[in-house]
Image: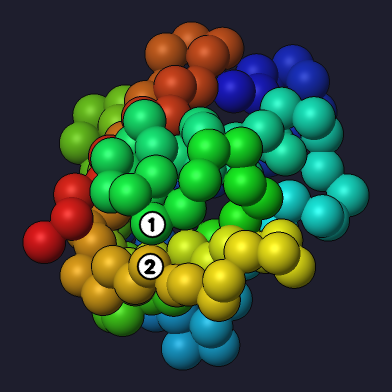
Amino acid sequence: MLTAGSGAIKAAVGASTLNSLLLALYERKALDTHARQDEQLTEELKFMLSTTFLDNIIPELCEVFDYDEPISVELTHTEAPQAKLINNEISLQGSLQVQIKATADYVPAVTLLFPNVTASVSITFDKETMTIQPTFNKA
């Protein structure tokens, strides 16, 4: 968090302002994203885009794919996220469609589709620290 002495401008933003911004971003599909292991990523992020890492989050993954396979992940919002402000915490909630594909040439073309995933992100501010806690739930 920036202090007044750092030359920052302080501003107050309400939930309706955040929700208007989120709706505009949703309508422009600016919140949708994708990631592939063969993109320019750090080694840690490349590992996170493997079946071995994601099997800890989605146990069905290695029933379809082998371990250590590169994958791509696409997140598509199915509705505009909603923001809530409570004290020093911003809470964002929304629904996503998650699509996971194997990207190696030798792997059969298999796609896992999770059409109804709810996502929550809690962002807490405490003096000079910001804590982000994401939560995903499959329907």
Q: Position of residue 120 (x, y in %)?
A: 27, 47
Q: Which mark is residue 99?
A: none
Per the rendering, the mark at residue 112 is 2
**Depth-wise, is mark 1 or mark 2 nearer the camera?**
1
Identify the residue at the far bottom of this view.
27
Kindly indicate whether the residue at mark 2 contacts the one at mark 1 (C-beta within 8 angstroms): yes
Q: Of the residues shown, which amino acid type is indicated by label 2?
A: Leu
Residue 64 disc label: 1
State the CA–CA distance, disc 1 to disc 2: 8 Å
- Disc 1 element: helix
Q: Is residue 28 visible?
A: yes
Q: Residue at x 43, y 29 (%)?
A: 132
Q: Nearer the viewer, residue 18 or 114?
A: 114
| Amino acid on which disc 1 is placed | Val
Q: Quadrant of the N terminus?
A: top right
Of 90 and 61, the residue lying toward us: 61
